Amino acid sequence: MLRQIFAMVAWGWAACAMVAMSCWVVDLPALLPHSLSTLLPLSINAPSPIARVGGTAWQAAAWDCCLFLGLAAQHNIMARRRVKQAMRRVAGVPYCLERSVFVLAAGVALAAVVLLWQPLPLTVWQVPAPWSYALTALALAGFGIIYSSASAIESADLLGLQRAFAGAQEEPARHEGPGLVVKSWYQYVRHPIYLGYLLFLFSTPHMSAGRLLYASLNLAFVLWSLPLEEGDIAEELGKPYEAYCHAVPALIPALRPYTVRHGQGGAEGPSGDAQAKKVG
């Protein structure tokens, strides 16, 4: 019972952190009436109630980069197989809670970025109508890609719930799963969740220096993460995934869908860390 409660708390905290981050990035208080904006006083262009603002713009940017580095390091270090094995061996974290611990730590790191970020409100670009509507539509399309892609790889397992409720104490043997499965957006691009997230961050009619910095840091994080994640997945799935990587672009969608050749894949396999051990 405690295992399921911990997983639900971790999932709830991470979900709240992601919603708060989305509202923070789009500067939601500026889009709402004043009576409603006070309910969620979080904006990337204004300090949070607990943030201390001071110094020059360069000092603020340096502080923001350090904050984001902590978030990026948490993701890419805790997601590695050796680190997870050490968590089980040294810290005694059971396999069924491994993902929930990662999700909780990610939520804490993301909340720290949102709450301690130093604003840089200088306007980089301001796009007038009707082109502003196109950028807003592109950002909403990014959200749609994120949602549909997460659904394709079982978001409950991606956030640790499925594993915690199943209660497995040991990691399944490698290559035990049925192999490579490709569906949804994964037929066109290897990392559609990253693609959708970057579309959401960069597609805005009003780009401030702070949002541009945050978006650029996320782009750097994605480029750092890709070889690490794909190395783990290739080790798990072998040559079928290597063939998939050669045929499908990482972030720019292909025009034709990819299909798994006979003998390369099978039914759906277990989810992995950031993308999935299956692909879609």
Image: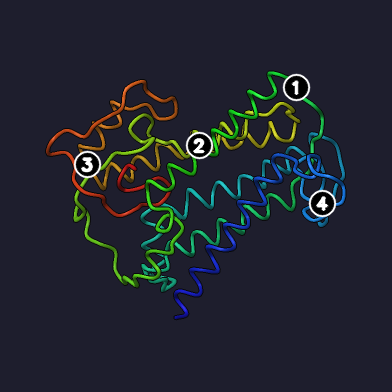
For the residue marked with disc 4, what is the amino acid?
Answer: Leu
Location of residue 123 by image quarter:
top right
Q: Residues within 10 Å of mark 1 (few under 14, many from 20)?
A: few
The x and y percentages for residue 175 are 19, 52
Residue occupied by mark 4 = 36
- The reply to whether discs 1 and 4 touch (Cβ–Cβ < 8 Å) is no
The x and y percentages for residue 94 are 38, 71
Which sits earlier in the primary sequence, circle 3 or circle 4? 4
- Vertical placement of residue 149 versus 17, above or below: above
For the residue marked with disc 1, what is the amino acid?
Answer: Trp
Which sits earlier in the primary sequence, circle 3 or circle 2? 2
Tag shown at residue 125: 1
Of helix, strand and loop, which one carries label 3?
A: loop
Distance from the alpha carbon under mark 4 to that under mark 2: 34 Å
Residue occupied by mark 3 = 238
Which sits earlier in the primary sequence, circle 4 or circle 2? 4
